[in-house]
Image (cartoon, grey):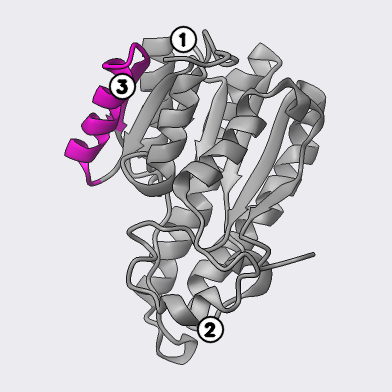
Amino acid sequence: MTSSKNLSGQTVLVTGASRGIGRAVALTLAKEGAEVVVNYSNSPDKANEVVHLITSSGGKAYSLKANIAEEDAVKELMDSILEKSGQIDVLVNNAGITRDGLLMRMKMEDWKSVIDLNLSGVFLCTRGVARSMIKQKKGRIINITSVVGLMGNGGQANYAASKAGVIGLTRSAAKEFASRGITVNAVAPGFISTDMTKDLEAEQILSSIPLGQFGTPDQVAGVVRFLAADSAAAYMTGQVLQVDGGMVMS
């Protein structure tokens, strides 16, 4: 792997790393020299494929199954990483789901499942790495939110609420952890070409994007790489970086 290796000797946990944006982030940070923990919940084959792509190119990676919406599972995940790798230097909270539907017809289970994974999962993983990062007096936490958390979206009340919550959590954690040498930032993708967006009405969406095209997972991963590995990002915390083709300008 040819790279500046800015993350050499560091361990990175990427949640939901078996596909889409998480997969791209895992591959990108591995190129920076990180040992990448590929977290997954339901796709062991895809997770192991990501691990194989990294290790076959000379990088370091292993996969761990955990449903990050469950407190006990997160504790077990963190304990396993610390036992195997000794440290967690970077956390990328990426795992997320959608359960779309109009608010008046939305079932409580669809509301709760999205909030539990997309928001509570970020809280549990952030809390889970905090102690070891504080002990190290350094760490970077990067939360994948969404422009939907900034602007709302009809039919996605649960998803928008979860992603808006991630932004509030990001800024609160940034203030709590700043004195401990830990930065906490968020990346807000717009419409990115992944399994999650493949069934959307492309023509209607593209008309609302000034750059006129969907983004790619690699473009989001590039911004995560900057926050995780670039020394210039060491003076940034509590920020939300939008990767949306100009869709939301604020």
Secondary structure under tag 2 reads: loop
The answer to whether 201 appears left or right of 10 in the picture is: left
The answer to whether 62 appears left or right of 121 in the picture is: left
- Report if residue 115 lies within the magenta region: no
Q: Earlier in the sequence, mark 3 or mark 1?
A: 3
- Report if residue 47 lies within the magenta region: yes
Residue shown at the point (41%, 30%) measured from the top left: 27
Q: Mark 2 against mark 1, which lies toward the viewer?
A: 2
The residue nearer to you, when weighing 74 against 229, is 229
Report the disc number at residue 154: 2
Residue shown at the point (75%, 46%) measured from the top left: 239
Labelled pair 3, 1 in contact (Cβ < 8 Å): no
Residue 243 to residue 9: above or below? below
Q: Earlier in the sequence, mark 3 or mark 2?
A: 3
Q: Position of residue 133 (x, y in %)?
A: 62, 21
Q: Position of residue 119 (x, y in %)?
A: 53, 55
Task: Provide the residue designation for mark 3.
Answer: 62
Task: Provide the residue designation for mark 1.
Answer: 86
Task: Compute the Cα span from label 2 to label 1.
Answer: 44 Å
Task: Compute the Cα span from label 3 to label 2.
Answer: 38 Å
Magenta region: 42-64
